[in-house]
Image (cartoon, coloured by chain):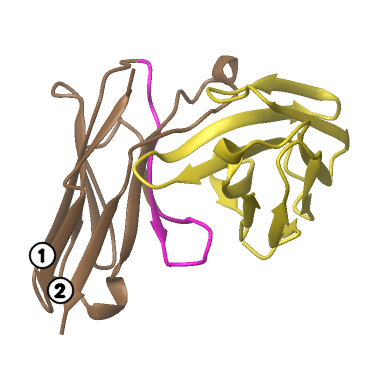
Amino acid sequence: DAGITQSPRHKVTETGTPVTLRCHQTENHRYMYWYRQDPGHGLRLIHYSYGVKDTDKGEVSDGYSVSRSKTEDFLLTLESATSSQTSVYFCAGRDRGGEQYFGPGTRLTVT
Amino acid sequence: QQQVKQSPQSLIVQKGGISIINCAYENTAFDYFPWYQQFPGKGPALLIAIRPDVSEKKEGRFTISFNKSAKQFSLHIMDSQPGDSATYFCAASKGSGGSNYKLTFGKGTLLTVNP
């Protein structure tokens, strides 16, 4: 979905460093989601937002935090990156019809 | 606890054949069932979705069949083409607002269509 962009697209970082991934949307989605995708696990929900400053945990939230100060931007932060957080991260937004649309993903490698 | 089980993990089909991917769910509160298609290096793209008030939905060569009593739904790809080669994910969610529309995904099926 061209309405959802993610930055950076690729990042390599060292264990113990903080990392912030950005999701930007131009579709005025109220609901937004962060997922991680790992081989053999499919897509797993990390955190989600149901409005500005309204967020909640998903099934794999440990080690992650999120913030949403305005409708357009949803940030995912790894407070202290670990090798187990090496993954591909996807942001998604839900439209009024109930369908979720995904961004292009960020490939994160923690060394 | 895996709430959406998808099978098979991988599938090889000849061009022109029918590809069938199955999913089973446990939570009877689920009432929205989308399928996503993902090509390497890309984000998942919504392919087709169904709600339990119908047993089948067709869009072009793609059909979802839904069996509420069995808690199962499947994706059929007719006249499969090499360009259909991708990973397919089923998902489910509770449509009412209380769940915040969170999707639970199956683990994916890697489809290869041979020419």
Tag 1: amino acid: Ile
What residue range appears in magenta? Answer: B29-47
**Quadrant housing residue B10:** bottom left
Q: Is residue A85 magenta?
A: no
Query: Residue at (13%, 24%) from the top-left corner?
Result: B70
In front here: A56 or B98? A56
Please, is residue B115 above or below residue B76 in the view? below
Whole-number angstrom distance, CA of label 2 to CA of label 1? 6 Å
Judging from the image, mark 1 belongs to the subunit labelled: B
Numbered disc 2: secondary structure? loop
Query: Residue at (8%, 71%) from the top-left corner?
Result: B17
On the image, the x and y values in percent for residue B43 come to 53, 58
Task: Say if labels 2 and 1 share a chain.
Answer: yes
Residue of label 1: B18
Q: Colour of chain B?
A: brown
Tag 2: amino acid: Asp
Shown in yellow, the chain is: A
Please, is residue A21 above or below residue A10 in the view? above
Q: Which mark is residue B79?
A: 2
